[in-house]
Image (cartoon, rainbow, N blue to C red):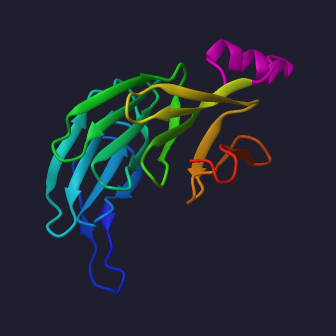
Amino acid sequence: MRLWPVEGGAPRSLAGHELNIWEVRFSPNGREVASASFDASVRIWDVETGAERRRLSGHDQAVVGLDYSPDGRLIATGSDDSTVRIWRAADGALLRTLPNGTHAHKVAFSADGRWLANGGRARGPVGGLWHSITGAGGDAAPVHIWRVADGALVAALPHREDVAHVAFSPDGQWLVTGGDMPATQLWRLRPAGQR
């Protein structure tokens, strides 16, 4: 991974991952950058020095989704091992493992930090093959919304195809999802004025 100064100068190489790096995120305070890799780890780097500060280990397969909570206290990860995990950013302690059912791709915290959304595979391997051959198989629910405080699944949203991207609106009233479909989907999460 390389860290580039925006105003010019030589990039800094951050070496350590053994396989492809799939996702990177700066911490909200800008002092750290996290990287998620196919080597099943997440590494946290010091932006100023380039030193590795912590390593988050526990996923069994590639880590492809990564996000910091808005206050910088939590890190969420999504993995091909069909789990979403929530970690304490300060020391890398695993706080929750959320069973996703299929590969968990993109993860995103809401702006108030209360909710975590993830997109993933719409079907398992056999269902995916059947769907690609016949077009049958109906809608799956590869988008999940979790309550961060206790890890409860509060919504599972349908998509016919895999979902690779999720994002909350700044006011938390909308979620946008996209992936292997020719159009994105926009979801209204709560009525206007309701918190």
- The image shows residue 111, relative to residue 48, as above or below, that is above
Q: Quadrant of the N terminus?
A: bottom left
Residue interval drawn in magenta:
122-139
* Most foreground residue, 170 or 42: 170
Q: Is residue 48 rendered to the left or right of residue 188?
A: left
Any magenta on residue 12? no
* In the foreground, 40 or 86: 86
| Residue at x 36%, y 24% (from the top left corner) | 97
The magenta stretch spans residue 134: yes
Q: Position of residue 117 (x, y in %)?
A: 53, 39
Is residue 95 in view? yes
Report the side of 17 relative to 142 (left or right).
Answer: left
Residue 143, compared with residue 187, is above or below; it is: above
Q: Residue furthest bottom?
A: 7
Q: Position of 9 compared to 70: left or right?
A: left
- What residue is shown at x 71% (from left), y 45% (from top)? 188
